[in-house]
């Protein structure tokens, strides 16, 4: 009996040893490229940015970078500091743009995806037309719409043709936000549309056929089948759109230069101004870390409240 137990233990030990020897490194090789890029372009810049935020870091004075601890962060919440009014004004402008842009970038994209998912001649051409602007750079898109919304641009010429006075779109509020939002929606809506269109094509046709047999009309099918089946994709599109809108920079930089009176200066624009133009990299890094943490919280809340699935 004892011999049998010893043999069983030996067999188990041998099996465990063979399992140890059979560990494959192939999965780690697949992960390695992503891990390298993640470390080089995300993790390390974030860590180094936090390090910079602890100093009065001036690139023009490498020998004079005193350690200030959390002072750069404290200045963002101190009404008496120079950074406080500019930073919170820029953050408020960014929130305003999010309100202007996120709804059309998601809602109109969903409508376009539904229309492009139908069968009709030229469907492929329309898909290309809607996606084509996304292939442009932000510079090209912003310069194009800057030209359209100038005082002598196409929009004002059209207004004059119908007897209306020209509008100073880029020099007054809210006209500047209207111009920037239209530029952004035209430029980026194709990306959201393609994502939603792909998700629509994955919904089984049998669901719509069964709903039709039960007497459901198109509106009922949209709200009872399409929207619930797209829920996870809609949350994803909403999240990436929110992050992209919060990172607005190129359009106001080119179209309005942050004006009028800093009215379109977004938080990323402010970080650029603080770090690259004023040379205060420590303050700019503190702003960046704060905004990154704020976006993480917003993303979490987005998935928390909109990403929940119904209990079965």
Image: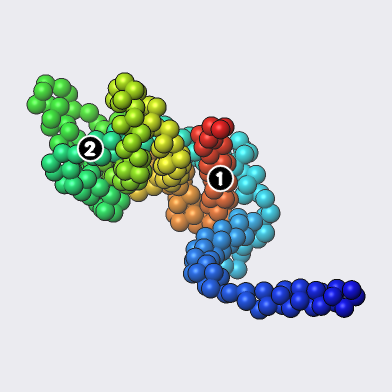
Name, please, the residue furthest toward the right: 2
Q: Is residue 230 left or right of residue 133?
A: right
Q: Residue drawn 15% across and 27% down?
A: 159
Q: Secondary structure at mark 2?
A: loop
Foreground of the two, 36 or 289:
36
Give the mark nearest the N terminus, 2 or 1: 2
Foreground of the two, 27 or 12:
12
In the figure, residue 108 lies in which quadrant? top left
Disc number at residue 118? 2
Q: Residue drawn 22% across and 37% down?
A: 118
Q: Measured along the vertical axis of the image, is residue 153 above or below residue 212?
A: below
In the figure, residue 62 lies in which quadrant? bottom right
Expressed as whole percent of the image width and height from the top left, the position of residue 304 reads: 56, 37
Q: Is residue 120 left or right of residue 117?
A: left
Expressed as whole percent of the image width and height from the top left, the position of residue 86 reads: 50, 40
Q: CA distance from mark 2 to mark 1?
A: 37 Å
Q: Residue drawn 17% across and 33% down?
A: 155
Quadrant of the image containing the C terminus: top right
Q: Is residue 51 visible?
A: yes
Mark 1 is surrounded, within 10 Å at the Cα level, by few (under 14), some (14 to 19) or many (20 or more) other residues, namely few
Q: Nearer the viewer, mark 2 or mark 1?
A: 2
Q: Measured along the vertical axis of the image, is residue 274 above or below residue 105?
A: below
Foreground of the two, 208 or 25:
208
Disc number at residue 296? 1
Q: Is residue 53 left or right of residue 191?
A: right
Mark 2 is surrounded, within 10 Å at the Cα level, by few (under 14), some (14 to 19) or many (20 or more) other residues, namely few
Q: Is residue 266 visible?
A: no
Q: Residue drawn 35% across and 44% down?
A: 202
Q: How is the protein colored in the picture?
A: rainbow
Expressed as whole percent of the image width and height from the top left, the position of residue 59 reads: 52, 63
Quadrant of the image containing the N terminus: bottom right
């Amino acid at each position: 009996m004892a011999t049998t137990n010893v043999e069983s233990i030996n067999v188990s030990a041998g099996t465990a040893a063979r399992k140890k020897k059979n560990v494959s490194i192939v999965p780690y090789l697949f992960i390695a490229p992503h891990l390298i890029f993640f470390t080089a372009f995300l993790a390390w810049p974030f860590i180094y940015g936090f390090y910079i935020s602890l100093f009065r870091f001036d690139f023009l004075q490498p020998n004079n970078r005193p350690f200030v601890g959390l002072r750069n962060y404290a200045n963002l919440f101190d009404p008496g500091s120079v950074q406080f009014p500019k930073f919170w004004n820029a953050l408020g402008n960014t929130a305003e743009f999010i309100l202007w842009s996120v709804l059309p970038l998601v809602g109109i994209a969903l409508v376009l995806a539904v229309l492009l998912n139908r069968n009709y001649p030229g469907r492929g051409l329309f898909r290309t037309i809607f996606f084509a602007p996304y292939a442009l750079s932000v510079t090209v898109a912003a310069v194009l719409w800057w030209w359209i919304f100038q005082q002598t641009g196409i929009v004002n010429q059209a207004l004059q043709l119908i007897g209306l006075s020209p509008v100073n779109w880029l020099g007054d509020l809210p006209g500047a936000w209207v111009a920037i939002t239209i530029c952004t929606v035209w430029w980026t809506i194709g990306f959201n549309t393609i994502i939603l269109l792909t998700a629509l094509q994955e919904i089984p046709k049998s669901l719509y056929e069964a709903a039709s047999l039960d007497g459901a009309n198109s509106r009922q099918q949209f709200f009872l089948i399409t929207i619930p089946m797209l829920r996870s994709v809609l949350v994803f599109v909403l999240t990436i759109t929110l992050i992209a809108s919060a990172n607005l920079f190129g359009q106001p930089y080119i179209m309005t230069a942050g004006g009028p009176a800093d009215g379109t200066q977004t938080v990323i624009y402010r970080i650029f101004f603080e770090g690259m133009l004023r040379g205060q990299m420590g303050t700019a890094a503190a702003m960046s870390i704060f905004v990154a943490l704020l976006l993480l919280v917003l993303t979490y809340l987005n998935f928390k409240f909109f990403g929940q699935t119904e209990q079965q």
